[in-house]
């Protein structure tokens, strides 16, 4: 049997970032604090650094992405690294090359960090087991299982807008069963001590009972949203659903779409979140997505800051191991 891969090095620092499972709250908070230093204010030049000077970061994405891939590239470049973006379907993988041969090939070109998105569970850890001792592997989203940097940027956004986690009720709505975003955000938020997590979904989109332990489950959105502080809307993950998916989109929107009328049932200061990409008119109405309670674009901005924080942390940890 293969032993669990430690993400942490002997100094307790991140060598890889595959999952938020088991990360100490102190380390999560440290990453959120570090990200604050990389905040980009509208209209100002983005912060830059040399923490990754001389490094090369390779994005290997085997699933579509706008936010995660672009923000990892910006994060790497703003910290002084070279960045490679490999569209896996247009790479030699399409000619039959294995993922490990692709990794070895890029490692021979002095890649220091691989950021991997894949629909296959276990691939990120598999790669982490095969890279050289000096190389780090960061998940850019693994199947329905994990999207750790998304979980961190969601936690940062909530912290910035709502303050202390311990007083908050956070409600996830939609296709939670197939959502890696919900799983990683739940890990981060429970680790940071949120008071209450709620799940609102139709039966076929509700996760199994052994997951999201302690969360309150609702089939009625009107009941689940009442008095909540944070509403996290999720799209239907059609690419991960084998069984029949709802075809009556109007009916889905009526039952599980976030409208202004429904949002009025939440706490008056509630924030609206969505990891993107959004399906306007399905899980969220346009006026809510663009409305005053929406922090969706703050999430995007925080994506760059969090990815800078994670890359800078990993680089610092490597320097410390080498010294
Ligand atoms: N939230 C997120 O992962 O978005 P992308 O698929 O655009 O990267």
Image (tube, rainbow, N blue to C red):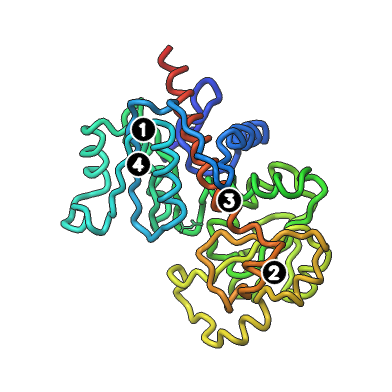
Q: Nearer the viewer, residue 99 or 231?
A: 231
Label 1, secondary structure: give it. Answer: loop
Q: CA distance from mark 3 to mark 4?
A: 20 Å
Badge 3 density bin: few <14, some 14–19, many ≥20, Cα 10 Å: many
Q: Relative to 10, is 122 above or below?
A: below
Task: Point out the frontmost of discs 2 and 4.
Answer: 2
- Judge: label 2 CB < 8 Å from ligand 1: no
Q: 208 left or right of 221?
A: left
Label 3, secondary structure: give it. Answer: helix
Q: Relative to 149, is 323 above or below?
A: above
Label 2, secondary structure: give it. Answer: strand
The residue indicated by pointer 4 is 127
Compare marks 2 and 4 and give the one earlier in the sequence: 4
The residue indicated by pointer 2 is 200
User: Which residue lies at the image location 26% right of the left edge and 30% below the top edge?
Assistant: 110
Q: CA distance from mark 3 to mark 2?
A: 17 Å
User: Which residue lies at the image location 18% right of the left edge and 55% below the top edge?
Assistant: 96
Q: CA distance from mark 1 to mark 2?
A: 41 Å
Q: Position of residue 221 (x, y in %)?
A: 73, 74
The residue indicated by pointer 1 is 81
Q: CA distance from mark 4 to mark 1?
A: 21 Å
Residue 260 is drawn in which quadrant? bottom right
The residue indicated by pointer 3 is 184
């Amino acid at each position: 049997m293969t032993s669990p891969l430690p993400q942490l090095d002997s100094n307790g620092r991140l060598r890889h970032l595959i999952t938020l499972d088991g990360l100490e709250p102190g380390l999560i908070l440290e990453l959120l604090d570090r990200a604050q230093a990389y905040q980009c204010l509208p209209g100002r030049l983005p912060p830059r650094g040399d923490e990754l000077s001389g490094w090369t970061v390779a994005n290997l994405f085997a699933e579509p992405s706008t936010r995660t891939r672009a923000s990892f590239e910006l994060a790497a470049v703003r910290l002084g690294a070279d960045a490679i973006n490999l569209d896996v379907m247009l790479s030699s993988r399409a000619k039959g090359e294995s993922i490990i041969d692709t990794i070895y090939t890029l490692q021979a070109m002095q890649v220091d960090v691989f950021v991997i998105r894949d629909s296959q569970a276990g691939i990120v850890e598999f790669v982490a087991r095969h890279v050289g001792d000096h190389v780090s592997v960061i998940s850019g989203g693994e199947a329905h299982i994990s999207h750790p940097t998304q979980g961190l940027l969601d936690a940062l956004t909530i912290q910035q807008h709502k303050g202390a986690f311990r007083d908050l009720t956070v409600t996830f709505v939609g296709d939670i069963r197939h959502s890696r975003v919900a799983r990683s955000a739940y890990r981060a938020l429970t680790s940071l001590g949120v008071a209450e997590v709620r799940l609102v979904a139709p039966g076929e989109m509700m996760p199994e009972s052994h997951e999201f332990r302690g969360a309150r489950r609702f089939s009625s959105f009107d009941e689940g949203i009442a008095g909540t502080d944070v509403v996290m809307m999720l799209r239907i993950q059609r690419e991960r659903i084998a069984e029949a998916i709802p075809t009556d989109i109007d009916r889905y929107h009526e039952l599980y779409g976030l409208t202004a009328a429904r949002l009025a049932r939440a706490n008056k200061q509630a924030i609206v979140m969505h990891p993107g990409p959004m399906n306007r008119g399905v899980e969220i109405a346009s006026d809510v997505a663009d409305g005053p309670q929406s922090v969706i674009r703050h999430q995007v901005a925080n994506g760059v800051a969090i990815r800078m924080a994670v890359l800078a942390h990993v680089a610092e940890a490597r320097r410390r191991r080498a010294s």
